[in-house]
Amino acid sequence: MTEREVEQLTAFIDGELEASEAEAVKAKLAENAEWRAMETKLRRALKSLQTLPGPVPSAGLKTAVMSRLDDPKPSFVETLSKFFTVRRLVTAGALGVAVVLALLWNFYQGRVPATFEDVEQVYVAEHFDELEDFEVLGLQDTADLEVVEALHQLEGNP
Amino acid sequence: MAQDEDAALFLLVKGQGDKAAFAKLFDKHQASVVRFAFRFVGSRARAEELAQDIFVKLYKSVQSYQPHAKFKTFLFRVATNHCLNEVRRPDHAREETAPPPQLEASGPLAEQPDQVLEGKELEEAVSRGLRAMSDRERAAFSMCRFEGLAYKDIALALAASEPAVKSLIHRATQTMLKELEAFEASRQPEESAP
């Protein structure tokens, strides 16, 4: 039997199925021995639960309850102090410290996304030699751009 | 006492703070609440404390009771919430390691010593089955199997849908079935002995 079928059978035994669903289960029980065996097992188990003696409430329970009915409701501060136990505060504090440490770690590892200014600085760093050459030569006209571009070749082949 | 009479009594509590009406409701439902709490936490002493808290909470939350709701459903909603909160307490796990509960054999199993022993072993098997369930499965199972609540009332008490309750009860019943089959199997050699 599938899980779904056993679920249907359990609900059937509990009298919780719609009429049409109950009819379908009855038909299965009439034609299928596996269904009947499961029904017997379930009914037997459920019957054994009914034989269990429950705990008997003590004689003092009623007195205890009735004497507490006029207890004032706990104040807001009492409710808060009940909620914020030492264990919860320690856990929350530890989590807070962990979050701050993680943020600091990310910041110092350079995992913080680069800003626009950072991008410009990175470009300067990458092309530092070329930009230095421009500064040394000074740009008079467009031909100077070609000179700078070929400067390393010119330096290599005097 | 019919279900609507329970609601009428509780409305007296709501309207006039009628403690005599509340006492009548307590008398009628105390065994049910203690049994439910006991099945939930597995300790008789703790179940009594929980039942005490549940009835006090019930009294204090009377203003949120809607006349169209069944009293027993409202009561079990309060009881379920309280028991679920109890088992989520950090120190509950330590208490759970206590030895299995000892019950007074006040039911039909009290008549013969061997029946008392069998009843005690069955009780232990049922306790194991209950402990093997999730909290919500245990709540749904206890309300259904020990208190006779319908799926729709359990759904209201658990704030869940009926199909969800059907599934919870199915899974819990299968868990209990396994424990009870193991219990039966362990008893067979004794029963077949001369």
Image (tube, helix red, strand yellow):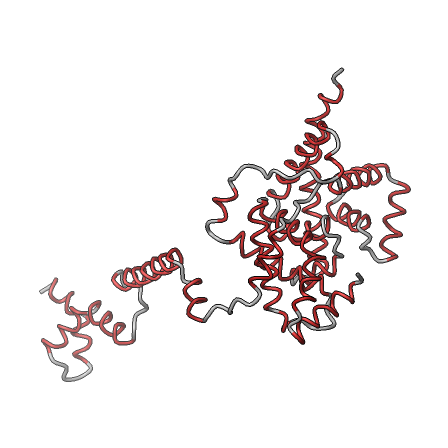
Q: What is the quadrant of the N terminus of chain A in the image? A: top right
A76 horizontally vs B119: left or right: left
Residue A96 in the image: state x and y as whole percent. 34, 62
**Residue found 17% across the figure and 69% down from its top:** A128
Q: How many marks overall?
A: 0
Q: In this view, does B35 lie above or below A106?
A: above
Q: Which of B138 and B39 is in front in this view?
A: B39
Q: Quadrant of residue A21?
A: bottom right
Left or right, residue B121 beside residue B98? right
The image quadrant of residue B25 is bottom right
Q: Residue at x 42, y 70 (%)?
A: A77
In x, y percent, where is residue A79? Answer: 45, 66
Residue at the bottom extreme, as displayed: A140
Report the front residue among B172 and B89: B89
Of residues A127 and B90, which is closer to you in this image?
Answer: B90
Which residue is depicted at the point 73% across and 24% down? B188
Q: In this view, does A28 lie to the left or right of B182?
A: right
Q: From what the image shows, is residue A118 above or below residue B156?
A: below
- Quadrant placement of the C terminus of chain A: bottom left
Residue A11 to residue A77: above or below? above
x and y percent of residue A126 in the render? 22, 67
Q: Where is residue A154 drawn, in percent x and y?
A: 13, 67
Name the one closer to the observer, B81 or B182.
B81
- Residue located at (64% from left, 49% from top): A57
